[in-house]
Amino acid sequence: MIAIAILSTLLVAASAEYCYNDVEAACSSRPLNTDAPLLANCNAKYGSFESLQADMQAYANANIETSFEYLLMSTHFGNYEVNREGFKGLYRKLSDKAWDDAIDVIKFIAKRGGRMNFNQLPRFKKNGKESRILELTELNSLAKALDTQKQLADEALRLHGQATQHSKQDASVAHYLEEHFVEKQADTVRDLAGHTNDLKSLLGDRDASVSVFLFDEYIKKTL
Amino acid sequence: MKLVCGIALFAFACVSFVTAEELKCTLKPADIPTAWLDMVDPCIKAMESQVKNEIEASMTYLAMGAHFARDSVNRPGFSKFFIESANEEREHAIKIIEYLLMRGQLTSDVSKLLKFPLRPKREEWNNGVDALSFALNLEAQVTGNIRDIIQICETPKTSTFNDYHLVDYLTADFLDEQYKGQRDLAGKISTLGKMMATHGPLGEFLYDKKLLNGEL
Ligand SMILES: [Fe+2]
């Protein structure tokens, strides 16, 4: 009798990751002698998502943080002294995009059986004060935005690399990153690099005020 | 090298871009009269801190959206509802910012408007009623915040300046939305609470699908 009990415990343990076994155990007439939650294995976890989860959470948080940094940059260009409608709109658009991306990553984490953790710090964000200066001139702001977008793009590539690594291959994560991030990020980075170089050549002028005015109008039209 | 990059803070970032020729990064500011700037300090401070409150509410709703999206919770209707709320709260913060900009504020220190990192007030809830009740209490708090701002801006301690326009805007726009939103949440808690009292999981399951299909 004891032998049968031990054997059946071993069998349950050996096939512990199956939802079906959980169901069988839960529905059997024998009372369950465990504190584990009911049907613990009836989850959406498969592949290598578990090992990628923390990085995905950090990426969602990076997008949230970036989104609010852009929002404050946009705010600065909206004050009456600076008064650049184009730059204001550009950073508002980037803020909206990062916010939507964060929500999308959170939904993806949930889809793959994970959970969001808002305390998982972004990997590439500096915590020093210097990174939080958001009252920038036109060219400085473009430089900051370009660097930020490149960091986000690099992190997406790094995550993609993780997801395609042999030991923890997960094509679903890799495909999600490609489809949702990698492609569009290339466009955003290129646009910002282009803007930065355009503005650079305009700022060579002795009096750049008219150039910056025209450039801001141009930016507004591209939105 | 001339000090073309303006204030020392920005100098470093500029220098890295200066190659052969020098760039004019900072433009000479214009002379703008300041007589039109009539907002008083306590009122400005109160409005600025409301930006933080709205974003905290937004982050909390986002955490609710994330919680109800989990496989073990599986309430897509609730998740959708709370993510929409998170978006609305973010819009509220932006509306406050836009108002301050319109009144000539936020010309310096925008970095101090938010405190990073931004965190939700809580990350897990027991069920739909628990989350909706948490939301209702959160909204009641925000309503209280807005009423406080109205009071401060109507009768500031430091001056006799009654900010009619701001008070009217907050009353007509923000308070209106707060009271309607609170009534909606209270109604939802009532309906769902009654169903869950007798048919716990089934009540929540049905209610979730109604939320998902926008039938409530
Ligand atoms: Fe709000």
Image (cartoon, coloured by chain):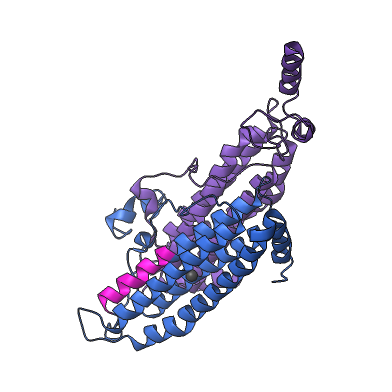
- Residue A50, horizontal then vertical, whole percent: 64, 34
- In x, y percent, where is residue B111? 37, 59
The residue depicted at 25 percent of the width and 80 percent of the height is B156
Give me the residue at 30% from left, 60% from top: B6
* Furthest residue in direction top, as rendered: A3
Residue B32 appears in the figure: no
- Chain B representation colour: blue
The picture quadrant where one finds residue A194 is bottom right
**Which chain is assigned purple?**
A
Task: Estimate the x, y position of residue A93 in percent, counting from the top left.
Answer: 56, 64
Please tell me which residue is depicted at 55% across the width and 54% down the height of the picture.
Answer: B63
Does the magenta segment cover residue B46? yes
Q: Position of residue B110 (x, y in %)?
A: 37, 64
Residue A140 image-quadrant placement: bottom left
Q: What stretch of residues is rendered in magenta?
A: B40-53
Above/below status of A39 relative to B172: above
**Residue A165 in view in this figure:** yes
Residue in the foreground of this view, choosing between B23 and A148? A148
Q: Is residue B71 left or right of residue B56?
A: right
Q: Quadrant of the C terminus of chain B?
A: bottom right
State yes or no: residue B206 in magenta.
no
Measured along the vertical axis of the image, is residue A150 above or below residue A78? above
- Based on the displayed image, in which of its 4 quarters is residue A82 positioned? bottom left
